[in-house]
Image (tube, rainbow, N blue to C red):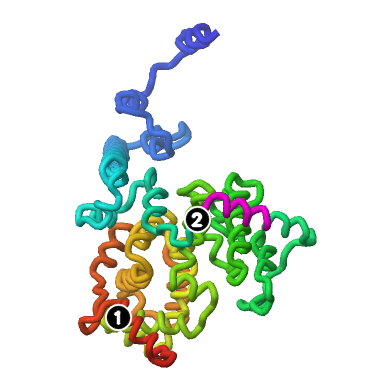
Amino acid sequence: MEYETNSSRDGPGHSPPSPRQSVRKNLDFEPLSTTALILEDRPANLPAKPAEEAQKHRQQYEEMVAQAKKRELKEAQKRRKQLEDRCKLEESIGNAAQTWNLEILPNWSAMCTSRRVRELWWQGVPPSVRGKVWSLAVGNELNITHELFNICLARAREKWKSMPTAPPTEPETEDAGLSLADREASLELITLDISRTFPHLCIFQQGGPYYDMLHSILGAYTCYRPDVGYVQGMSFIAAVLILNLDTPDAFIAFANLLNKPCQMAFFRVDHSLMLKYFAAFEVFFEENLPKLFVHFKENNMTPDIYLIDWIFTLYSKSLPLDLACRVWDVFCRDGDEFLFRVALGILRLYEDVLTRMDFIHNAQFLTRLPDHISPDQLFSHIHAVHMTSKNRKWGQVLQALQERNSPVLKR
């Protein structure tokens, strides 16, 4: 049928192609856009194009085609470079994972503090070994076993069964429930908070593949530490651990992480101790970023406004997830001090922007950081932060503040 159609087109009534059509057939490709109309002849009811105009249109069209080819070539080169960079990154991660698996992890006690391992650690722990490294670095001072996790989980499930089926409601205040003798009552808040944990991933919400795991860890913890109970922000920490560890091991790491002095101060809402951490942070803030420190002071921008959310979730809610995991890598190694060093790194990265903002815009910016932050850029700024003030390190400054009366944040 197609042959007949073509034959009929080439029959006696078929007219030869116009010079313009011949020109277009000689082009390297037929553009799928209206720009090609510039080469078309005018309708029969209009005067024909002068030769000069036709030549001008042909040149214009050829320039358009050349520009399109140039753009396409640039895009192809960009895609090729991205592919090469991705391949290099994957090769680098593969080599690093091999080093961690074959050399470092089997000799952990001897190598974990070596200069070479610390340098590799700073560059980011490969995802395939991240969970194992975190577990070893955090440790298990609480001596929690898989059996204890199962006991706490069973108790949580019993509590859930006895709860009313009505959906949980928001607590009236941040300290709601603190007066209860049994903090296990905070179990009902877990379901509400899980729905808001990394919602863009769609894996922790009800019906998602990690919902039960996250629910189990948070429920078991409220029964393991009824004096602490569940506090908003915990779900993000547990979720990051679940992405890198099996459920029982994630629970062990979770409980030990929250048992660190800084985390315990925040999650138990120990206001006097929190103020001391903020005051220690301000000492190093003034030392590293004096211009921004003065600007914040003039605008009454105190660190509690932005630090609380960062510390409560260990940056997992505030930074892109892959970048937050890199922060966790070094946090597991260096402890609480690194959390405040990261905060100074963020302020240093955006210092020029922040010094031009008023209080409202500073608060909005720091409580909702940009979605795209270069890991290398941020870690470069973190590296430039000096955690010494008048020959005193973070721990010494914090200890000195703890030995005094409750500090007042600088305003």
Disc ID at residue 275 = none
| Among the two numbered marks 1 and 2 on one chain, the one whose residue lies closer to the N terminus | 2
Judged left or right of residue 294, residue 162 is: right
Q: Residue 296: where, in percent of width, then height?
A: 37, 84
| Circle 1 SS class | helix
Disc 2 residue type? Ile
Q: Residues within 10 Å of mark 2 (few under 14, many from 20)?
A: many
Q: How many marks?
A: 2
Q: Residue 111: where, in percent of width, then height?
A: 25, 52
The secondary structure that dominates the magenta segment is helix
Quadrant the C terminus occupies: bottom left
> In the image, what residue occupies the spot 54% across and 75% down?
268
Q: Give the residues in magenta.
A: 145-155
Residue position marked by numbered label 1 in the rendering: 396
> In the image, what residue occupies the spot 38% across and 53% down?
136
Q: Residue 239: where, in percent of width, then height?
A: 52, 55
| 357 magenta-colored | no
Instruction: State whether residue 85 is above or below residue 14.
Output: below
Judged left or right of residue 66, residue 136 is: right
| Circle 2 SS class | helix
Residue 60 appearing in the image: no
> In the image, what residue occupies the spot 36% across and 77% down?
354
Quadrant the N terminus occupies: top right
Residue position marked by numbered label 2 in the rendering: 252
Disc 1 residue type? Gln
> In the image, what residue occupies the spot 50% across and 46% down?
246
Q: Residue 251: where, in percent of width, then height?
A: 53, 55
Viewer-closest of 26 and 107: 107
Among the 4 quarters of the image, the one containing residue 170 = bottom right
Among the 4 quarters of the image, the one containing residue 196 = bottom right
